[in-house]
Structure formats: C-alpha cells, structure tokens
Image (tube, helix red, strand yellow):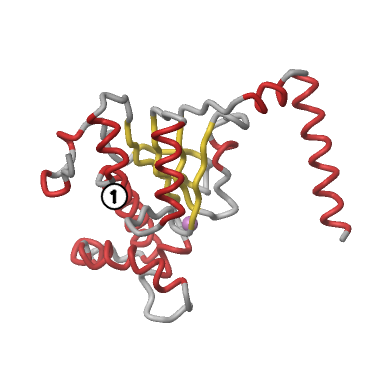
Amino acid sequence: MTDLKSLFANNVEWADQIKAEDPQFFNKLVAQQNPEYLWIGCADSRVPANEIVGLLPGELFVHRNVANLVIQTDLNCLSVLQFAVEYLKVKHIMVTGHYGCGGVKAAMEHKQLGMLDYWVRNVRDVYFAQQEKLDEIDDPEERIDRLCELNVVQQVANVSHTNIVQNAWAQGQPLSIHGWIYSIKDGLLRKLVDPIHCIEQVDQHYHMV
Ligand code: CO
C-alpha cells in the first residue's frame, strides 16, 4: 500500500507544480482539448510519450499498445484514429517504435506466449516478408532493432491505408503520418521515413477514394 500512497502523493505534487506555473491550466483543459498530434506508440513503460517530446497534457493524443501496431480490425486503435482525425483534427500522426521492443522480439522467436502470439503475429508477418535481409544480420540485437524499424514502416503504411486518413485527405484536411523510432539507450528519437501527407504517396492498390 505504501507504494500506491506515494503515487497519490506524487500526483498532488505534480498538480501543484503545474498550478504554480499556470493557475488556470486545469480550467483551460476542462474547457477543451486541442492536440495537434496523435502518438501511436508501444505500451513499454520506458517510452512515455508526453515526456519524450516535452508536451503537456492536452497537447498529445496518445494510443499505445504492444509493439505499436495499427491493425485494420483493431476497434480500439481505429476508434482513437477516427476521433483524433475527424473530431480533434490532429495535423500529425507519429507511429513511434523503439529499439529492443519485447513485442518485436517475441515475433522472432519460436515459442508460445498465449494471446500475445495473435497480436505480434502481425510483426511476424513483417519479418517473413523481409526475412532474407534480416537473416543477413549476424548480431541478434541488431536484427531485432532492424525489425523494430521495419515494423514502424509497415505501421505507417497501415495508417495511410485506412479510410479515415484517406477521407481526411480527400476533404483537403492537412494530415501527415510520420515514422519515428526511440532509443531507450540515449533517450533520443530518430526519423525513419519521409512523412506521408497525401494519397499520391500511398500505393495505388490501397486507394479507397
Ligand atoms: Co515495445
């Protein structure tokens, strides 16, 4: 219980600090949230979205799951995406992976983890599609990290394949999709791909508009 008590104590301290800097901060947040960014990242506790990019509550809409996946049948992720794009009108979506991701590692191993197997199966498919190149990498850690990168690239594409994003573009809404990766070793973000900001950058096969 002591540990949980300290969390509440931390919470009071945090709220006090924010109010000391801006007494109206929470009043303004109650009135509206107006984030420009949707962060789709891994649930890993070492990758705290807001802190990494120095944004306050209200500035970053966040969806996190194991291995930062965007799956076309995942109601949770798609609902977040729809709300962020259609109602909040975010301008940027960043799919942010991280090196050494346990979910990605699990997708490379030949053992069962239960329900997780179905989830990370999507990463296993990314591995299979790029297996030749990945297997050329001798260092196992490096191989996992490369798959972490390739997984982000695939998830960026998956975002661009949704009717949510394609409809927004068709209506002239400015919206860019970014693929980033975070290193737990140095706390830094890196860009992986050029942002996708229009339907012309999406493979014709996936056009729905
Ligand atoms: Co992870």
Residue nearer the viewer, 184 or 196? 196
* 96 up-or-down from 150: above or below: above
Quadrant in which the N terminus is drawn? bottom right
Residue nearer the viewer, 87 or 202? 87
Residue 155, percent across and down? 32, 50
Three-letter amino acid code of the residue under disc 1: Asn
Quadrant in which the C terminus is drawn? top left
The residue sitting at 20% across, 63% down in the picture is: 129
Residue 36, percent across and down? 46, 27
Q: Quadrant of residue 19?
A: top right
Residue with the mark numbered 1: 158
Q: Quadrant of residue 13?
A: top right
The residue sitting at 39% across, 44% down in the picture is: 95
* 67 up-or-down from 198: above or below: below
Residue 191, percent across and down? 35, 37
Residue nearer the viewer, 184 or 200? 200
Task: Identify the secondary structure beneath mark 1.
Answer: helix
Q: Work out which residue is located at the far left of the displayed protein and give it.
A: 204
Q: Is residue 32 left or right of residue 179?
A: right
Q: Is mark 1 within 8 Å of ligand 1?
A: no
Q: Quadrant of residue 139?
A: bottom left
Tally of marks: 1
The residue sitting at 60% across, 53% down in the picture is: 45
Residue nearer the viewer, 16 or 130? 16
* 184 up-or-down from 166: above or below: below
The residue sitting at 43% across, 51% down in the picture is: 77
Q: Is residue 63 left or right of residue 18?
A: left
Disc 1 crowd rating (10 Å Cα; few below 14, some 14-19, many 20+) is some
Residue 150, percent across and down? 29, 53
Q: Work out which residue is located at the far bottom of the displayed protein and give it.
A: 111
